[in-house]
Each structure stands twice: as C-alpha cells, then as structure tokens.
Amino acid sequence: MRKPFIAANWKMHKNVQESVEFVDAIKGKLPDPQEVEVGIAAQAFALPSMVQAADDSGLKIIAQNAAAEYSGAFTGEISLRGLADAGVSYVMLGHIERRHLFHEDNELVNRKVLAALQMGVTPIICTDETMVQKEVNGEIHYVFQQLMSVLRGVSLDQIKNVVVSYEPSWAVGYGQHANPVLAEEGCRQIRRTIADNYTYEIADKIRILYGGSVNPDNIGMIMNKPDVDGVLIGRASLDVDNFLRMVNYL
Ligand code: 3PY
C-alpha cells in the first residue's frame, strides 16, 4: 500500500514568523502520520525554524529547490548538505516555475536529483506536460522523455526513494480547474513509464502526486483516483483552515 502524501507548496509566500505560526496552528490537528504523510514546502530561510516547530508531529518540512553541487563558489544557491543538516526531509526539484522562469533544464534537474539522493534528502521530482506538447507529440511520449531524462543514472535501488509529482502547466499556478480524469491519466502514464524502465514492482510502490489547482473542493475527487497517491497544493494551502480541511479530507 502506498501511503498518501499531501503537501503544500507555498512558493514565495510567508516569512519565518508566519511559517512557524502556521506549523504551531496545525500541530495536533494533522491526520495520523502512519496513515497519511503531510508536508510543507516553504522558503529556504524558514525551514530550520519550521523543523523545530514541527517537532515530533510527523509533519515533513520540504525545500522548494537546491543546488546540484555539494559546496563551493555558488553565490545564492541552497546546498543539499545544509538542508540535510537542518532536518529537511524532502526537496522539490524541477517544478515548472523553476523550469520556465529560471531556465532549469532536464540535465540540471537530473544532477540535482542525483545529488539529493546522495545526501539522503528525498527528491520530489516534478514533471510537467503542456497542452501544446500533448497535441503535437502525445502525452505518453512527453512524460516519458522528460521523466526519464531527469532519472538518468538513478539506480534500481535509488528509485525506491523518489517521489514523482505530475504538474501539468495548464493547471499550475493559474487557479484553473484541476481535472481529476487528466490527473489520473498523467499519473498512470508516469507509473507505466517507471514500470517500463525499472520494474513493475517498483512502479507499484513509488508514490506519484498530482499538482495543480488542488483545493478543498476537489481534493477528494483527485485523491480517489487509483494512480494518484497524493497532491502538491499551491495557493489553497496558504490558509490554515483550508490546509486542515485538505489534509483531513478523508
Ligand atoms: C500549484 O498548484 O500551483 C503548484 O505549483 C503545486 O506545486
């Protein structure tokens, strides 16, 4: 059984005080961590305080990005070593906003994935496909190409420690309606891609999330889909009440 994983992606919102107050407000109201894993991806400067605030609540604190390099002259970058030291459990890599706004390509995301696995910070690998590419090439081919490029060099042993998030560009960030049928189709194709390139047993165990316009009204419909193991939630996760409604949607 794949444990459901519900995570907020706060993007560039909330300062340290707001982030810690949020964690304090939700602690004790989260689902049983044995049943559902809950996480928050926040801005880098807030992560250590959030780890401290989360304490033994089971809440996972997630970074939104990290550098591929271990250390050195990389002004402004966030090291995975530092994230691991700070007790950060997961790192999102290759989010569509990183790709589109900061020109991250498959090669760079791949290096980050390998570095995260080496440092013991679990990567949440975001993969997108756009309507245009879908119409031109077909969805399966695109997902396959991008995902397999960023997984290059990830061994059979390591792939078990990866989470994948399907975040189609038509649904991310614009507040458009999420489509549970298309969400399922994308996650199903990702699982098939992993089965084809690794093994069916691994594909069956790996968690695949959906991200894009998830909110308290649609989370149930999306989470009910068989290949959707969790969600990454943008704007709707910024509010304590909404967040609690979503993590306790069952
Ligand atoms: C969104 O829903 O906008 C996201 O970016 C989720 O990661």
Image: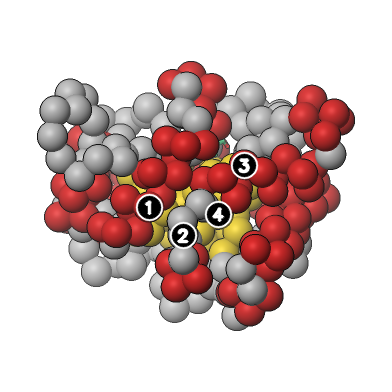
Query: To which residue does mark 1 refer?
Result: 114
The colour style of the image is secondary structure
Quarter of the rendering containing residue 4 = bottom right
Distance Cα–Cα, label 4 vs label 3 = 12 Å
Q: Depth check: 51 or 124 in front?
A: 124
- Look at the numbered discs 2 and 4 and tell me whether their residues touch, using CB distance below 8 Å: no
Quick one: quadrant of the N terminus?
Answer: bottom right
Whether label 3 lies within 8 Å of ligand 1 gets the answer no
x and y, in percent, of residue 28 in the image = 34, 65
Between disc 2 and disc 4, whose residue precedes?
2
Residue at 26%, 57% (x, y): give it. 119
Residue at 25%, 40% (x, y): give it. 69
Distance Cα–Cα, label 3 vs label 2 = 14 Å
Between disc 3 and disc 2, whose residue precedes?
3
The circle on residue 154 is 2
Query: To which residue does mark 3 refer?
Result: 146
- Look at the numbered discs 4 and 3 and tell me whether their residues touch, using CB distance below 8 Å: no
